[in-house]
Image: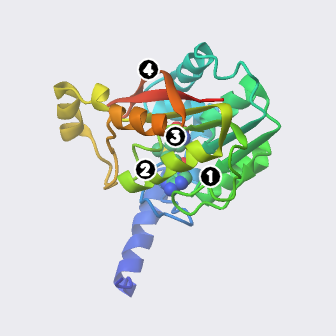
Amino acid sequence: MRAAGKGTSALKAGVRRVLARTGFDIVRSTNNRGGVDDFIPFEATMRAARSAGLPVGDYIDEVMNKTPGATAATIDELRGFGVFDAKPEVVLEIGPGSGRYLERTLKECAPGRYEIYETAAPWADYLVRTFGVVARPTAGSSLAPTPDASVDLVQAHKVFNTLTFLATARYFFEMARVTRPGGRIVFDVMTEACLGPDAMRAWATEGGDGHDSYPAAMPRHTCVELFATLGCTLDGSFLAPMGVGSTEVLVFAKGT
Ligand SMILES: C[S@@+](CC[C@H](N)C(=O)[O-])C[C@H]1O[C@@H](n2cnc3c(N)ncnc32)[C@H](O)[C@@H]1O
């Protein structure tokens, strides 16, 4: 890899100063493996939410994503699928970011233990401080620190459309491994249901943020077939808004 020269560093510092004056900032996370964990920079987002007088999750929904109520709507759907009925005692979330789903999940089921795998250290630290969750070492696509069949609810929201195909595939196997029999697995992927001609046109003309791996697609059939081989059946699915298009949330149950 080529090291950045002095000129490049000075240019970056200049850009940073200009952005800071306009209220934005570039905050790189400590582990940017997927090239996507700077989607929602910690300090700038917290500052902007404070200025707007909104909780950070609402700020992301309403102002950044222009989808007010989206997080609450997803949690409502999950409640409808009975995901919180058994009062999950151990929850694991991959890529919680600002914690907008995490916070609502805690309100739904008050688990005794909530593990997170999050590559963006500033967000992980904030979630540990604020909600007392347990941050596990996160190295890309493994849940190795979590024992087999130890988790009641495993979830990931708006993560697998930002990761590469291989990272997502590896996480799928890990999610099935750590889920206990009778537990639930919830995640969203950009399936064929989200990729009609209008959506394709919208992504082609308005999509992309300079992140090469976003948005990543994953066939629904592939997920359903794979999880079936891992002992998990699809309870149902629904669409949720994402960027210029939508994403499909899949809800699985692991057989007892
Ligand atoms: C688009 S954000 C979604 C954040 C949050 N789930 C939400 O919907 O607001 C993707 C999140 O996944 C995290 N992430 C990126 N690569 C990851 C990886 N390999 N393992 C775990 N988390 C990752 C990012 O840091 C970021 O917090």
Q: Nearer the viewer, residue 30 or 166?
A: 166
Q: Amino acid at mark 1?
A: Tyr
Q: Earlier in the sequence, mark 1 or mark 3?
A: 1
Q: CA distance from mark 1 to mark 3?
A: 21 Å
Q: Earlier in the sequence, mark 4 or mark 3?
A: 3
Q: Which mark is residue 169?
A: 2
- Residue hosting label 3: 230
Q: Earlier in the sequence, mark 3 or mark 2?
A: 2
| Label 1, residues with CA under 10 Å away: few <14, some 14-19, many ≥20 | many
Q: Amino acid at mark 2?
A: Ala
Q: CA distance from mark 1 to mark 2?
A: 16 Å
In what element is the residue under mark 2? helix
- Residue hosting label 1: 117
Q: Quadrant of the N terminus?
A: bottom left
Q: Earlier in the sequence, mark 1 or mark 4?
A: 1
Question: Does the beta carbon of the residue at mark 1 sit less than 8 Å from ligand 1?
Answer: yes
Q: Amino acid at mark 3?
A: Leu
Q: Earlier in the sequence, mark 1 or mark 2?
A: 1
